[in-house]
Amino acid sequence: MKLRRDVFQAIADPTRRTIITLVAASAMTPSAIAENFDYSRQTISKHIQILTECEILEQEQKGREIYYQLNPKGMKEIADFIEPFRKMWDDRFNTLEAVMKSKIHENKK
Amino acid sequence: MEQKTKIDAQEGKQELTITRAFDLPVELVYKAYTEAEFIAQWMGTNVLKLENKNHGSYEFETSHEGNVMFKANGTIHKLIPNQEIVRTFEMENMPIGVQLEFLNFEKVTADKSKLTIQIIYKSEKHRAEQLKLPFAYGLNMAHDKLEQILTSLK
């Protein structure tokens, strides 16, 4: 069994982040992606493979060529990652607001 | 509707920014951060120490049924009343490490204000540990606490 890679480790790498940015603009072939880097084609293929395993990129066959594009599911996972943290702070600040508002009411008594 | 609390955590950075719009005068939001009584209420923690001055320090501790569940501490670097707090914050026994916090308090109108907290972590990895935390238990804890307080206000 292959362990599913950690999405957040995948995006921690600057080269992979650049690949995500490139592909976000339009679907690209591996060679078109590799042209943007000074690394070997093999290195870039490895990065693409990791991003695909993490479901951040997905393949699409167009004629003879394979194109890579963003996988909305993986990207959603990244976006959702922040949400519980935001919710936690939102709850905390709602509490702060409630506590301080009750203080205003006390003073008015 | 626009969210009152926003998180900006850009990829590849070791910092994040939390912004919050409050229906409160800026003085009260500042008080919520600098008076032990209020910190205890909204953060749900005991304030063991709080020296509100430049180069002062603070310590928080949360116990549940006699067991210490959470300890945090930090140093207050700079305070400008109703405007700014610069401090460090560290949760003990957590992989997040020490974080540097810049809190900016802004008056919007007489009874509305905005708080911006910029937090800088040791590395992007430390920031990720922080972001993962609510998945484990933070969310439930904060939620329970909120319900308790709201119930007590009724």
Image (cartoon, helix red, strand yellow):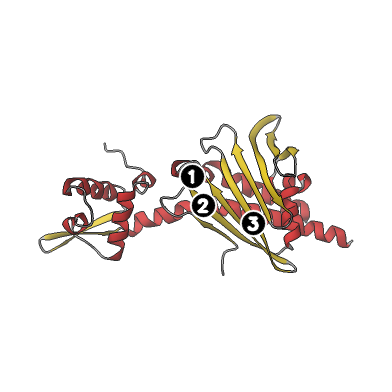
Q: With respect to residue A104, does B89 lie above or below?
A: above
Discs 2 and 3 lie in a common subunit: yes
First in residue order: circle 1 vs circle 2: 2
Q: Nearer the viewer, residue B18 or B83?
A: B83
* Mark closer to the observer (3, 1): 3
In percent of the image, x 76 and y 44: which residue is there?
Answer: B36
Residue visible at 50% across and 46% down?
Answer: B131
Residue drawn at 74 percent across, 44 percent down? B53
| Between B143 and B121, the one nearer to me in the picture | B121
Q: Quadrant of the N terminus of chain B?
A: bottom right
Q: Quadrant of residue A94?
A: bottom right
Q: Earlier in the sequence, mark 2 or mark 3?
A: 2
Subunit bearing disc 3: B
Q: Are discs 1 and 2 less than 8 Å apart at CB?
A: yes
Q: Secondary structure at mark 3?
A: strand
Query: Around disc 1, counting alpha carbons within 10 Å, would you say few (fewer than 14), some (14 to 19), or many (20 or more)?
Result: many
The kind of residue tagged 2 is: Leu
Question: A97 or B120: nearer the eye?
Answer: B120
Q: Position of residue A54 (x, y in %)?
A: 31, 48
**Quarter of the rendering containing residue A98:** bottom right
* Disc 1 residue type (three-letter): Arg
Instruction: Identify the image quadrant of the C terminus of chain B.
Output: bottom right
Q: Residue B104: which disc?
A: 3
- Label 2 neighbour load within 10 Å: few <14, some 14-19, many 20+: some
Residue at mark 3 to residue at mark 1: CA–CA distance: 20 Å
